Amino acid sequence: MKRIFIFSICIACLTSSCSKLLDKEPDFVTTEKYFRNESELMNSLNGVYNRLIDTYGRMYSRGLFSYLVVSDEAYFKNISINNIRVMVMDAADLDITRLWETLYEGINRANLLLENVDRVEMDITKRNAIKGEALFMRGYYYYILTDFFGKVPLKLSSTQSPNDPYPAQATLAALYTQIVKDMQEAENLVYESGVVPNERVCKTAVQAVLARVFLKMAGQPLNDHARYQNVIEYTDKVIASGKHQLNPNYKQIFINHSQDINEPKECLWEVGMFGNKIGNIDQAGMVGIENGIECPDERIGYSGGAMRITAKLYDLFGQKDTMRRDWSISPYRFVTTAGVTQKQYYSAAQLYDRNPGKWRREYETGTKVRSANSTNFPIIRYSDVLLMKAEAENEVNESPTTAAYEAINQVRRRAFGKALNEVNEDSDAPGGMDKIAFLDYIKDERLREFCFEGIRRHDLIRWGIYMPTMNALGRDISVNAPAAHRYGGNAGLNTTERNVLFPIPNTEITINKQIVQNPGW
């Protein structure tokens, strides 16, 4: 991290003493000997945040913007069979198992902190903020869990013993009720925006994520359409705060990440990576490496170019939205000839060779290493707040309102480099659309704005179109792409209804007899 440093603490709650075997004090810390002061509470909170970064790449350091969120925006180079990247996996897949484990580790750490936070005598505002952030993070980890796995066990107390009884799966209604409860309680406890770095959640970040949760609840599988009104309520809170605005320069958002610059006006909440795996601290990520521009030169910033874009995504930008397109999708790669590395620009026909270009390692500062960096990853940006508002306004009012057009057009004008509050014929969404046409426009705009940010799969699932969208993409690539790239359609062709949810890991099914496997797995 840049401004707050993530520590991982390990607190053992077992009370049996090993001094009966060895004539020395136990080498673990009990809760009775911890949570004594503000510093220890903060270490515990940092340990809760820590699970956003899994050192093996299953969280936001890699997987949650890459191979765990396969969609119609990209495919993976040279992978055609027997891999999660082409939807070939099962309930024994290690990446899926580790995702499940990491999320429950985060939940258990949050539970432990919440059970002990009130023991410490300290400034009440600081203690409330710590409590609020822990509540929010518990809710957020459950949100990711249920988004990927559906019905999961709901555990609201820390593990005290290996002999604790195994919890049953909760209903989706119970899970989302708890998620909303935790986040709404957190809303009134956390700091206002600007008091702490945006690597910690503040009030407007909580409100923005709550809007995302409500938008999911309004869609599949719950289809609770009344929640669209909650989306408007919470996006309006963020907008009315006056704390956030669009960065007028789209590409600068991602340059700031690469240069370790926190910019909280556009990015309400981002995952703070730290270091580059040199030394003892392992909180680095692969933003701009896994989803980066192919480059063999480590001095510029190595990337194997693992992710390649689809022609569907490129074509969606059209002939005018070129500034945002040519930043989101790199128009070049790096090649080294006779020891000299330079940019090699693609021809018009080379669509399937191109890589994501949002995070460009050439902008990184400090020592560069091959496969790790400190580039932060944005979980939610202000443009998402605006587009969520536009979508919800359209749904609640059965047609796009003036407010819906104003919200989407701010995002569109920024993409074109235009003034945010001035009508522009080139950038603005077409007037006179009905509800269905406006929603279709929102679907396309969200793909243009948030490509490679781990959101597209989530959106397609809540709209109920994940399988048909992926199948159509697979057919298109397998027929129309150049022969050398037609394997890129395999993920789409392999997608079935079961892929809306991940399988619950075999390890959990084996030990917890109250869990029922998801359909199709």
Image (cartoon, helix red, strand yellow):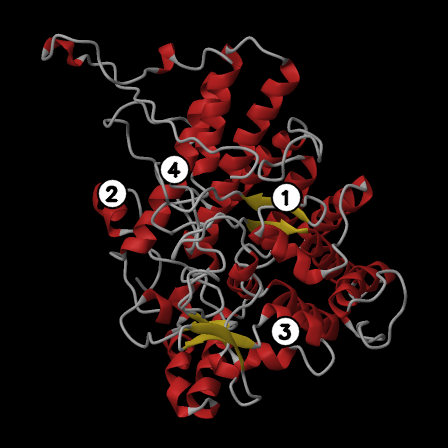
Nearer to us in this view, 435 or 381:
381
Looking at the image, is mark 4 or mark 1 earlier in the sequence? 1
Where is residue 61 drawn, in percent x and y?
Answer: 44, 50
Which of the 4 image quadrants contains residue 30?
top left
User: In the image, what residue occupies the spot 29% across and 51% down?
Assistant: 505
What number is the disc on residue 508?
Answer: none
The residue wearing badge 3 is: 326
Picture disc at residue 281 = 4
Q: Which residue is mark 2?
A: 513
Q: State the residue in front, 4 or 486.
A: 4
Residue at 35 percent of width and 61 percent of height: 519
**Residue kind at label 1, given as amino acid type:** Asn
Q: Quadrant of the C terminus?
A: bottom left
Q: Identify whether 101 is placed above or below 451.
A: above
Q: Nearer the viewer, residue 54 or 518?
A: 54
What amino acid is found at the position of numbered circle 3 in the picture? Answer: Asp
Is any part of residue 109 visible from this angle?
yes
Eyeballing the image, is 97 above or below 184? below
Tag on residue 262? 1
Question: Of label 4 and label 3, which has the lower sequence position?
Answer: 4
Q: Is residue 444 visible?
A: no
**Secondary structure of residue under mark 3:** helix
Q: Nearer the viewer, mark 1 or mark 2?
A: 1
* Amino acid type, residue under disc 2 in the picture: Lys
Instruction: Bin the neighbour count of mark 4 within 10 Å (Cα to Cα): few under 14, some 14-19, many 20 and up.
Output: few
**Image quadrant of residue 338?**
bottom left
- Asked if disc 4 and disc 1 are in contact, CB closer than 8 Å, the reply is no
